[in-house]
Amino acid sequence: MRALISVSDKTGIVDLAKELHALGVGLISTGGTAKLLADQGLPVTEVAEVTGFPEMLDGRVKTLHPKVHGGLLARRDTPEHMAALQAHGIDTIDLLIVNLYPFEATVAKPGCTLADAIENIDIGGPAMVRSAAKNWKDVGIVTDASQYDDVIAELKSTGKLSDKLRFALAVAAFNRISQYDGAISNYLSSVNFEAEKLREDYVPERAQFSGQFNEQYVKVQDLRYGENSHQQAAWYRDLAPAAGSLATGVQLQGKELSYNNIADADAAWECVKSFDTTACVIIKHANPCGVAVGASPLEAYSKAFQTDPTSAFGGIIAFNRPVDKAAAEAVSKQFVEVLMAPDFSAEALEVFKSKVNVRLMKIALPAHYGNVRNALETKRVGSGLLLQSADNHELALADMKIVTVRQPTPEELNDLLFAWKVAKFVKSNAIVFCKNGMTMGVGAGQMSRLDSARIASIKAEAAKLSLQGTVVASDAFFPFRDGLDVVVAAGATCVAQPGGSMRDQEVIDAANEHGVAMVFTGVRHFRH
C-alpha cells in the first residue's frame, strides 16, 4: 500500500505518517511536507522522484501528472486500466491525505491583497482529491485531521479500509471541494476590480453581496415533518456555527425537536440573548408573548408568564442564566414544549425527570454573547433568494431623540430600552407595552398598527394587567395619530417609535396634547 501526503495544515500529520509507516505503508509526499517527514526520520519519496519532473513555477505544478492521477484513478478491477499502468510504469496510490491551501483564512484577513487571494487558490490539491474520491472503491481520500484516527483504526484492525469508510471519506472530500470552490466564487465575484490599481499590494474593494452567493450547511438531523404534517423537513447548521447559537445546543432530554420547535426556539434564544441582565422569554408561534428581566430566573419567569398566561401554554421558554430548582419548579407547573438555558442545576434536572416529553436544551453562552448574531439573513422567494444583513442594531440612550414637551423620566427611558429590545423580535406590525422590566401587553403580526395597539390592550386586560404608567414601543412609525391615541387611552405615558412619517408632526402634536413623552429612535424594526 502507498500513501501520498500533501498538506497545507500539518496538524497531526507526523503522528499519522508514523502510524502508516509502522503498518508498512509506503510514503510519498510533496515539498514542505516531505521535508517535515524526512526530518522526523521517516522514509519518504518525493513526488518529483515519482513523476520524473521537479516541482516548478513556485510549486504551482507538482502533482498534475499522469503518474499521480493514473495511480489514483486506475480501477483495480479493470484489466485494461492495470495494463495501462504497467505499460507506462505507473504504480497505484491507495491512500491520499490532502488538505488545501488556506484560501478562506487568507481572504478573511484584513487587508488581504488580490495577489495573496489568488496565490492561495489550490489547483493540484483539489484535482487529486477529485481523482481519489471518484475512485473511492480503490482509494481512501483523507481531507481533514479529524479523520486520521478512524483511518488508522481500520488499517490496524483489518489491514485495509472498508467500503463504508472509503465512501464516507469520498463524500466528505467532494463536500470539501464544494465548500472551497464556493468560497473562491463568493470572494472573486464580490471584488470591484479596478485594473488601473492592479499591482502586488492591491487590496480590492469588495461588494457586500457577491455576484454569486454560495452557502454551505451540514445536516443536523432529519425531522419528522415540516411546518405541517404533509411537509418534509430537515435541520441544517452552518459549517462553523457561532458560539452561543441554537445550532450549538445539546438536547438533554425530551422528544425529538420538531420544525416549529426549532423555529420558535431560535426566536426565543435570539431574543433572550439581547439582555445583559437575567431575563426570561416565552415564545408562541414565533412571537414573544412574555418577556421580563428580574433579580433571579424565577422572578424573570414569573413576570414574563404574567403577560399572557393563555398564550404561554405550550410555549417555548428561554433563560439567559442557568436554571435553578426554584425556576424549574415554577416552569414545570405549565405545559412547555422546549426549555432553553446556558445550564441547569442538578436539582433543576431532577424536577423535569418525570416530565419526559419536555425538551431541555443546554446552549453554552460565550462572553459578550449579546453580540453573537448571524451576519446575514435569507428568505426564499419564487425561484430566488432575498439576502440582507441581519437586524443587529442595538439602541442606546444617546440614540433617542426626545420630540415632545414632556421629558421621559429615567425609569421610563430604561423601560423604553427594554420595550425596544422586545419589539425587534415581535412580528410586524408590533406594539409592545412594558413597565418595570416586564412586557404588559403585546400586539403582533397585524395588517394595521392600530389593530396591534388594540390587541395589546385587550391581551393586557385579559391578563388583568393595568397599562397605567406603561411605556410603548412601536417597531415602525405611527402613520396617523389614531394609533398613539389608542395606546395613550390604554394608559401609556411614554412612547418610542422610529419617526420618519410625513405626519410626524401630527403625531408629535397629539402626544403633546395628551401630555405624554415621545422619543424617536431613527431605526425601524420590521420583522416579517
Image: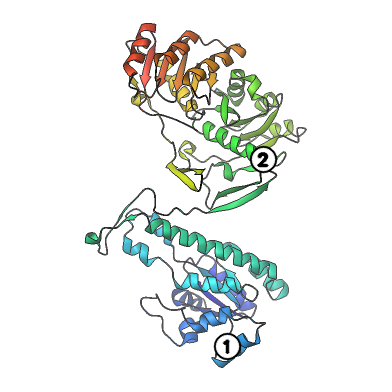
Residue at the limit of the structure toward the left, as seen here: 196
Mark 2, secondary structure of its residue: loop
**Residue found 39% across the figure and 49% down from its top:** 209
**Residue found 65% across the figure and 26% down from its top:** 327
Q: Quickly name the residue at label 1.
A: 85
**Residues under numbered marks 2 and 1 in contact, where contact means CB atoms less than 8 Å apart:** no
Give the image location of residue 368, x and y in percent.
47, 38
Q: Relative to residue 22, is residue 405 depicted above or below?
A: above
Mark 1, secondary structure of its residue: helix
Q: Where the N terminus falls, by quadrant?
A: bottom right
Q: Quickly name the residue at label 2.
A: 258
Residue at the limit of the structure toward the right, as seen here: 354
**Residue found 60% across the figure and 30% down from its top:** 285
Mark positioned earlier in the residue sequence (2 or 1): 1
Give the image location of residue 473, x and y in percent.
45, 21
Give the image location of residue 25, x and y in percent.
61, 79
Q: Relative to residue 110, is residue 441 depicted above or below?
A: above
Q: Relative to residue 258, is residue 510 depicted above or below?
A: above
Which one is in front, 230 or 396? 230
Give the image location of residue 103, x and y in percent.
42, 61
Colouring of the image: rainbow
